[in-house]
Structures are given as C-alpha cells and as structure tokens.
Image (spheres, rainbow, N blue to C red):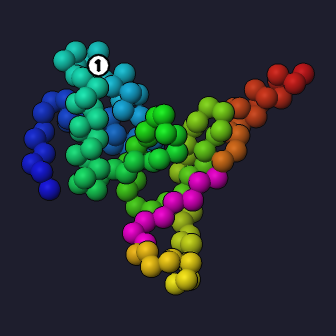
Amino acid sequence: MKLFRLTPQRLAIRKFLEGNFSHPSAEEIYGALRRRFPTLSLATVYNTLAALQERGEIVEVGLDPAKKRFDTVAESHHHLICVLCKKILDIPEMWKPVLSEPDKRGFQILRSQIDFHGLCPQCQRGNREQKH
C-alpha cells in the first residue's frame, strides 16, 4: 500500500465523505470543495479517491459508466437507484445472496451488490404531474 500523505485537500475530501451516503462523484466532490480550496484540482480528487479505494475505505459504485460514484460504506450492501435522477440510496437491511458452487463457476466471492432500479418518490411525482 502506498504512503497516503494527508494534505489539507485530502483531509477535506475525507471529511466531505464522512457520513455522506449520497454516493458522490469526483465532480460533485470537486464542486463542493473548490471554493474553499482554490488550488484543488479534479485530478487531486480522483487520485485521493483512488488512494482511499486502495486502502479499502471507499468503494466505487459502477452504475453509470459516464460518471463514477463512490460509496463510503465499504461492506457489501445493496442499492435503490432512480433511473431518472440517478439518486442512489443504500438498503439498510442486509441479506446475502447464496450461490451454489456451480453458479460461482470457480469465482471466490469477495463482495456482492444487488441494485434495484426504479423511480424515486420525487421522480414519480414529476411523472404524474407531466401526464396531467
């Protein structure tokens, strides 16, 4: 594991992520911190996220290939995802899918994630309003 030097920018990124369950993207983190840290670059945010991911402190949520999102809950868990606004919510109840040995096809399972795609309450309301 590489040395992780805690610069003021990296500390701010870590603090932003603490208790943040919105699954922010690097761009959202950068946008939230750049006024307070004018020398902060998007590359610094990406590099910090990569280092935190390497250390097992966050995980990448690969739901949208155009926009990587990051999850501060590194343990296996599941998500509700709105297909319109892209909001991601963690599902607090935990159950582990059981795969038979033939279904695993030789894989050693390290973590699992099940995603449920649908419409969040706000987008459902918006859809109803557009129809009327």
**Residue 122 placed where, x, y %?**
69, 32
User: Which is more toward the observer, 70 or 65?
Assistant: 65
Residue 14 visible in the snapshot = no
Horizontal relation, residue 71 to residue 86: left or right: left
Horizontal relation, residue 98 to residue 49: left or right: right
View extreme (right): residue: 132
Please, is residue 112 above or below residue 121 in the view?
below
Residue named by callout 1: 34
The C terminus: image quadrant:
top right
Horizontal relation, residue 39 to residue 3: left or right: right
View extreme (bottom): residue: 101
Which stretch is magenta?
109-116
Please, is residue 122 above or below residue 119 in the view?
above
**Residue 11 placed where, x, y %?**
20, 36
* Residue occupying image coordinates x 66% and y 33%: 84
Please, is residue 36 above or below residue 23 in the view?
above
Residue 39 visible in the snapshot = yes
The N terminus: image quadrant:
bottom left
Is 54 magenta? The answer is no
User: Which is more toward the observer, 14 or 101?
Assistant: 101
Q: What residue type is labelled 1?
A: Arg
**Residue 48 placed where, x, y %?**
23, 39
* Residue occupying image coordinates x 40% and y 43%: 70
User: Which is more toward the observer, 12 or 68?
Assistant: 68
Is 110 magenta? The answer is yes
Disc count in the image?
1
**Residue 12 placed where, x, y %?**
24, 32
Quadrant housing residue 119? top right
**Circle 1 sits in a helix, a strand or a loop, which is it?**
loop
